[in-house]
Structures are given as C-alpha cells and as structure tokens.
Amino acid sequence: MVTVGSRADQTPTYTNLNRFVGIGGPYHIADHYIHESNRGVENISPMTPTMGGLSNFDFHSPTVISGSSHTALEEHSLPPFCLFHGADDKTVPVSSSVKLCEALRNAKQRADLRVVEGVAHSDFILHLMDVNSCKHRSLMALVLDLPTQNQHPLE
C-alpha cells in the first residue's frame, strides 16, 4: 500500500512502501537521449514526447532529482532502491543504473545495484514471466532475496 501526502513545502512523502525495484531503466533521461542518438533511434523513441520535450529531461530524471541540491531528502526518507540491470543490455546502458545508485547513496538513501551477467534489456522480465525459462529460477531468486525496509536496510 502506498500513501502519498505532502508537507507544507509540497515535498511528497511516502509511507508503507517497502522498496522500489527498478529493472534496466533509463534513469537519466538526457544521458539516455544521447545513447538513443548514437544508435540513430532518437526520432522514433517515445522519450522526447513523453517528457514534454528536451528541456524537461532533467525535471523527469530520477538521477538528477536525487542528486540535486534543491532536493532536500532526509536520510533514508525514501524506501530502499533495488536496481537490477542486465550486463548485456544494449537498449539502456548499465551506466544508467550505476549513476542512479550513486546519486541515491550520495543523498543518503539506501540503494543496491545488481548487474546480472548474460541478461539483455527485455530478458529479465521475459525470463521472470516464463517459468520454463532456463534463467527463471536464478532471476526469481534474486528478486525474492531482496530485503524490505523493515528487515536489514540497504547501504
């Protein structure tokens, strides 16, 4: 259950959220746009229209937001972040998750990154959905092994 409220300064607060699990996400939108441009797919990508144009990339980038001096996050005010990224991901570089993990830790938030060998961008989800997949069991074990906020916090 997620409860979203606000303080007087309009900073959102979240309660009853045990953890955030991210899988191969483009957490720094401007970096991802550069990556898409290098691949020649920026014009067919939904990233720019979804974000409302290039000028809004930083506003919607978790890496930028969590690392901003304007974001006054109290220590451990967010749920633990558990980030997974496939080592063979060509769609979203592993550096996206690395940068978010570093920004969260610098903001005194709990964050853990697990780079999974032999997994590309969509493989993680596809293997989790297919119980007959050769990687289903090992990937499911990684997900089920995640600590919750009430267990041992991620550092």
Image: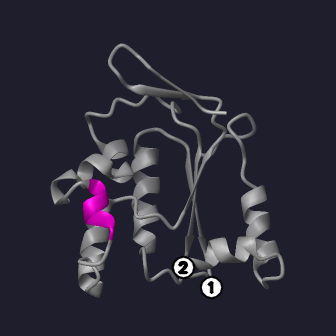
The residue located at (32%, 18%) in the rendering is 9
The amino acid type, in three-letter code, at marker 2 is Ala
Split into 4 quadrants, where in the image is the N terminus? top right
Q: How many angstroms separate mark 1 from mark 2 (CA)?
A: 6 Å
The residue located at (29%, 78%) in the rendering is 44
Q: Position of residue 73 (x, y in %)?
A: 40, 31
Split into 4 quadrants, where in the image is the C terminus? top right
Stretch of the chain drawn in magenta: 46-51
User: From the viewer's perspective, is 139 left or right of 71?
Assistant: right
- Which image quarter: residue 68? top left
Q: Position of residue 147 (x, y in %)?
A: 72, 47
Sequence-first tag of 1 and 2: 2
Check disc 2 and report its element: helix, strand or loop. Answer: loop
- Which image quarter: residue 96? bottom left
The amino acid type, in three-letter code, at marker 1 is Gly
Residue 50 inside the magenta-drawn segment: yes
Q: Position of residue 93 (x, y in %)?
A: 42, 75
Foreground pick, 128 / 141: 128
User: From the viewer's perspective, is 132 left or right of 123?
Assistant: right
65 above or below 83? above
Residue that badge 2 annotates: 87
Q: Position of residue 120 (x, y in %)?
A: 55, 82
The residue located at (25%, 51%) in the rendering is 58
The residue located at (43%, 28%) in the rendering is 12
Q: Which secondary structure is most common in the magenta stretch?
A: helix
4 above or below 107? above
Residue that badge 1 annotates: 118
Does the residue at mark 1 contact the one at mark 2 (Cβ under 8 Å)? yes
98 above or below 89? above
User: From the viewer's perspective, is 42 left or right of 90?
Assistant: left
Label 1 CA crowd tier, 10 Å (few <14, some 14–19, many 20+): few
